[in-house]
Image (cartoon, helix red, strand yellow):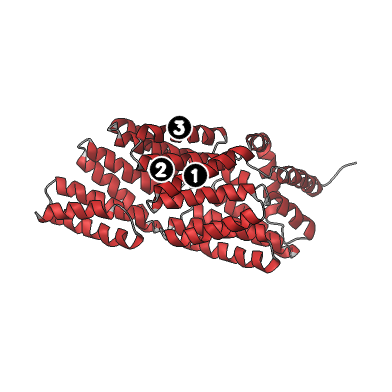
Amino acid sequence: MTYSNSICKSRHSKYYGELISRLNRPTPENLAAFDLERINIEGGFDWIRDKVDDDDEIASICVNYTGYTVGVLFLRLHSRECFRWLEAGLLATRRLGFRRGEGARLGNLGSVFWSLCEYRKSIEYYERALEISIEIGDRRSEGGDLGNLGNAYARLCEYRKAVEYYEQALAIDRDLKDQKGEAGQLSNLGNVYISLGEYAKAADYCEKALALSTEIGDLQIKSSSLGNLGLVFWNLGDYPKAIDYYERALEITREIKDRNGEANHLGNIGVAHKRLGNYRKAIEYYERALAITREREDRRGEGIWLGSLGIAHKNLGNYQKAIECYEQGLAISKEIGDRDNEGNCLGNMGNVYKILGEKEKAKELLLKAVAILEPIGSSNVKIYRSHLAELEN
């Protein structure tokens, strides 16, 4: 018996859709399974992607491809490719009237825009997802949507608003005894309290997140918690201890092939080496982090590590190179709306011009930095104000 090419492709897509639907957590085993069958999985999705409006069976297959396996997809596909998958999944859930699935895909699309640094757009998707979660009484998804909104507002430097969303999400996760969700929100709260300069509170949340993520075996949250603890000790001036935490986090990101996390931890190790006076070593780590952010088209990360490279070159007396890095980082930060890094690039560039004796240029840049950073509560405002005071004397 022979089968038409269409029937064979349909069976292929259905088989691999069912396979990928079982990879519901980004564990090393599931990631390895995806890697082994990646060509077949992507081929199956490509065949059904443009056919989700054809009939309910194809829409159901598409739902399998874009469902609980999203954690694996985010670690293996570029954000723009994830958007292509999730957009098809959203159409499929709407065709089937699958409101819970529609809400999940809206939330995941919000995460795609978050990873692309389009935070206002991500908030739009998260809010639409939250509306559906509340409408259908899905408390677990409601907690996830609230946490995602907290993440977006944290990136916009609206830290107190982020805390409000995280605390609402944490309360729901604890009520539902959702340990993975609880660990994630504890880690998020630890991170945002670092941004607020409340390090004792931050450390408490991070240690709780680390203990819980270790208990449940969630490597991604464990890596984030270790990285956040590194950041706490960095802020407390214990740079060797910070490096130890960053290196432990880095090892996990490499194990699960989380390239974004790897770049973040590499860059943070560079920051710690910079504080230890190891400027050339810092540059080495920054450049490795920068290469990954460019590979992943992570514009926010690219802007941050360019700014960090500027600081290291300034410390080595490479002032023109430092200015070039700051200007590149500044352009990216303005483009994506990263006010924190925009202000820091301006302030650090102003300091270089101060060193070079160009007082008016330095003053102009430092005033712009203060105007941007003061409203968002950045602790660096004091540093730039001190530079301004020195220019006045």
Q: Nearer the viewer, mark 3 or mark 1?
A: 1
Q: Which mark is residue 247?
A: 3
Disc 2 + disc 1, Cβ < 8 Å: yes
In this figure, which residue is indicated by the disc labeled 1?
206
Return the residue found at the far right: 1
As drawn, is 365 to the left or to the right of 231? left
As drawn, is 87 to the left or to the right of 47? left
Which residue occupies the foreground of this view, 202 or 55?
Answer: 202
Residue type at mark 1?
Cys
As drawn, is 141 to the left or to the right of 338? right
**Residue 29: percent from left, percent from top:** 66, 34
**Residue 389: percent from left, percent from top:** 15, 55
245 above or below 299? above
Secondary structure beneath label 1: helix
Disc 3 + disc 1, Cβ < 8 Å: no
Which residue occupies the foreground of this view, 98 or 9?
Answer: 98
Residue type at mark 3?
Glu
Determine the image quadrant of residue 286.
top left
Q: Residues within 10 Å of mark 3 (few under 14, many from 20)?
A: many
Q: Marks 2 and 1, how far apart in space? A: 9 Å
Which image quarter holds the C terminus? bottom left
**Residue 45: percent from left, percent from top:** 68, 48
Secondary structure beneath label 2: helix
- Residue shown at 47% from the left, 59% from the top: 162
- Residue shown at 87% from the left, 42% from the top: 2
